[in-house]
Image: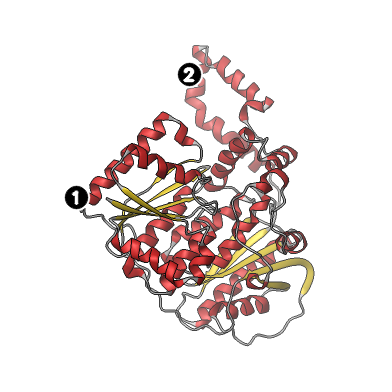
Amino acid sequence: MKFVVLNGSPKGNELSATMQFIYYLQKVVPGHDFEIFTVSKDIKRIENDHAYFNQILRSIRKCDAVLWSMPVFILLVPSQQKRFIELVFEKNKQKSFAGKYSTAFFTSAMVFDHTAHNYIHGISEDLGMKFIKGFSALTQALEKKECQDSVKNFFLHFIASVENREQIPKAYFPISWKPVPYKAPAMKKQKKKRDKKILLLTDHEPGSNLEQMVKTYQASSRYAAEVQNIRDLNIKGPCLDCLKCAFTGVCVYVDEMRAFYDEKILPADAIVFAGTLVDRYLSSTWKKFLDRSFFNGHRPILNGKYAAMLFSGPLRQIPNFLQAFESQFSYAQMEVVGSATDEEKTNTTTTGSIKHIAASIDRRLEIGGVRQQNFLARGTHLVLRDTIFRASPILNEDHRYFKKEGLYDFPQNWNRDKAMKMMLQAFMLFPFTREMIKRDILKFMVMPAQKAVEKARP
């Protein structure tokens, strides 16, 4: 059987942890042909060399199945892999993929690998492929026998599905989207407050709906919002996954990215993210910007800020994107205020949605926010907390930040919790107190909140 591997690691083949899974399968499941293309590492060549791009497409047309292979980058695929996917659609080359079986191999710290899988799953179906749910593993898991057996068995099942030409049920509806032209209405000019800083990041093109949405937000807010089109920033290249920043917190690129963070993003009180949706995510330009932000590591340095989103495109058809995008800011301990899109049927409704977002940000800047954590934010913190602690000699900057900010909240280190646990263990030793606790457990659970209610005053 002939497989084409689309390697999305910026590091190429030999230094890619994900590609080691492919190499392992070549050895333990022999008799198959694997043709590998380093589509992330070679993205500039693919963009500029039409012959090479067509060579990749010819190989895909001749193969039996396509294997997507990549690390999880900021809850998705690397921006270079995202750009390759954009090129396929821009050049209308979907037919090269149509009818092929495909699956995906991801490695990560197991933080939002599911949103990366969902994205590739949806993209594969948009290309007309028969996608079989992929394989996800910790970056260094292949050294364990259990993982070796699992990935081998997974691949054998995949091969059998391809050989038998099995019918694979679709997981996603195709995206159906006809944009309604949006124009910012004439609005009465108002004197803008400047005691709080709102930064609006966008990737809009001139004359686009998104450009008009940005203008509406600027006119609606009581604060002067500074607009920065990320297309205009001097960002020399995408994240290389070299991990140099893990030791020092400094990116190997020398460009405007770090200064922009220090001078614009960190001083901001609220950040509005504005983007056009492209193949189930934002543009690869946006993805490059987010990936390059990784010199900040896993540190929630944007904590205390407010976030809102303006999206041009079929947002409601791709909930996986919204979960991934909102969750990265929730983990950063920002308050995600909400989002507005141009999906509405009339300009009036779209304008009203944008005004609501602007008013919501304004109110929070004036009276305070609504701080809370959900499962996605808390779960991400717990996974990364343990990962950073174990790898602290390498993730040095993350480790220093977590220590300084008290983010190593291991329960066994909390004296109060240890005392409570010992007291409960003692009570459970005696029949009378054990039965009392069983009887009144619901009262005990609600008691702290009741005390807070009793003390509450207007």
Looking at the picture, how far across and down is residue 177, in whole percent? 40, 75
Q: Residue 223 carries which label?
A: none
Q: Which of 302 and 442 is in front in this view?
A: 302
Locate residue 423: give its quadrant.
top right
Q: Nearer the viewer, residue 338 or 172?
A: 172
- Disc 1 marks which amino acid? Asn
Locate residue 52: give its quadrant.
bottom left
**In the depicted structure, whether residue 319 falls above or below residue 407:** below
Looking at the image, is mark 2 or mark 1 nearer the viewer? 1
Q: Is there CB contact under 8 Å for labels 2 and 1?
A: no
Element type where label 1 sits in the image:
loop
Element type where label 2 sits in the image:
helix
**In the depicted structure, whether residue 259 falls above or below residue 222:** above
Name the residue rendered at 71%, 72% in the picture: 225
Looking at the picture, how far across and down is residue 21, in whole percent? 42, 42
Q: Residue 435 carries which label?
A: 2
Locate residue 351: give its quadrant.
bottom right
Looking at the picture, how far across and down is residue 279, in whole percent? 44, 67
Looking at the picture, how far across and down is residue 222, in whole percent? 72, 74
Question: Mark 2 vs mark 1: which is more N-terminal?
Answer: 1
Q: Which of 53 and 423 is in front in this view?
A: 53
- Disc 2 marks which amino acid? Glu
**In the depicted structure, whether residue 420 falls above or below residue 456:** above
Left or right of 369? Residue 427 is left
**Would you say residue 129 is visible in this rendering?**
yes
* Mark count: 2
**Would you say residue 315 is visible in this rendering?**
no
The CA distance from mark 2 to mark 1 is: 59 Å
Q: Mark 1 points at which residue?
A: 164
Q: Residue furthest left?
A: 164
Q: Nearer the viewer, residue 57 or 136?
A: 57
